[in-house]
Image: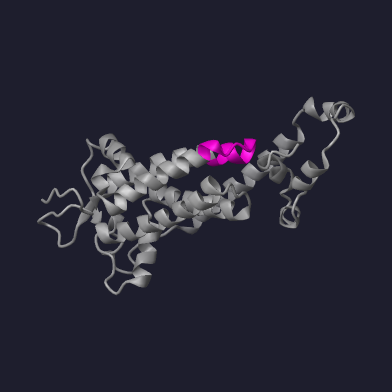
Amino acid sequence: MSNSVFQFGEIRPEYQIPVLNERAARAAAGILFFLALICFMNAWLTGNFQPTRVFIVSFLIDFTIRIFVNPRFAPTLIVGQWMVCNQQPEWSGAPQKRFAWGIGFVLAAAMLYLVVLNNVIGPINLIVCSMCLTLLFFETAFGICIGCTIYNLFNREKAQLCPGGVCEMPAGQSTGTSLGQVATVAVFLVAIAGIAQWVYSTAPKGAAEFEKPIAAQHAAPIDPAEAERCKVPDYAKAIGHEEKWKLHNNCK
């Protein structure tokens, strides 16, 4: 086994290609997903993008080490490996992982330019963040590497040693879902929808609803320049995003 500092994947005699411990990779994805979700919801609900900016820089540094130095030295993979150190390693092919992590690197670089360097706020940020969260969620929750699937679309040599043996599994041998199971999920969703409707219909009115007219009477005069800055763009109005846009741009 080679232990070179600048190396992507481990060279093991039983495999023909470099490999990575899939269990550690999934653990690292879970760590990133957890932190990313906290930062995303904090920005969405409170309009505070500072934690998001810190996370983006940290994410980009981590993935830079993964791709251009060695995954063994990436902080989240070190922590992930430590968390699963008592589990039997599951080796997966390194080439497709590098491609998948390259997608994450590009998305993080885009967010660095938009959010960290230029303070851009808008739908493009939401789309990029949603893509990152989706990739991380599928990786950690289901063991599905979407980037690895995309890898097969652009490479003649198909991916080998995929998590869960997906690459080696013959077509038609996957475990299916019965009609009864589908019906159970459908009934569950209908029941939850009914419960949610009942909960919202019986919710008590908040005190803030009655305080709005009083606060409006004592509102300070609005500066024309500030009013122009806080003019809600048409795209935000079109998607019903007016209040969130004001919150994210610190407009009262």
- Asked if residue 13 can be seen in this view, the reply is yes
Q: At 57% from the left edge and 52% from the top edge, which residue is drawn?
A: 125
224 or 33: nearer the eye? Answer: 224
Check the picture and name the quadrant holding the C terminus: top right
Q: Residue 199 lies in magenta, yes or no?
A: no
What residue range appears in magenta? 40-52
Judged left or right of residue 29, residue 245 is right
Q: Quadrant of residue 149?
A: bottom left
Q: Residue 48 lies in magenta, yes or no?
A: yes
Query: Horizontal and vertical percent for residue 13?
Result: 9, 56
Judged left or right of residue 243, residue 164 is left
Q: Is residue 42 above or below residue 102?
A: above
Query: Horizontal and vertical percent for residue 47?
Result: 63, 38
180 or 49: nearer the eye? Answer: 49
Query: Horizontal and vertical percent for residue 113?
Result: 51, 52
Q: At 72% from the left edge and 53% from the top edge, which residue is drawn?
A: 236
Secondary structure mainly formed by the magenta segment: helix
Q: At 29% from the left edge and 74% from the top edge, which residue is drawn?
A: 156
- Asked if residue 175 can be seen in this view, the reply is no
**As drawn, which residue projects farthest toward the bottom?**
156
Q: At 46% from the left edge and 58% from the top edge, which residue is drawn?
A: 178
Q: Is residue 146 above or below residue 30?
A: below
Query: Horizontal and vertical percent for residue 17?
Result: 18, 61
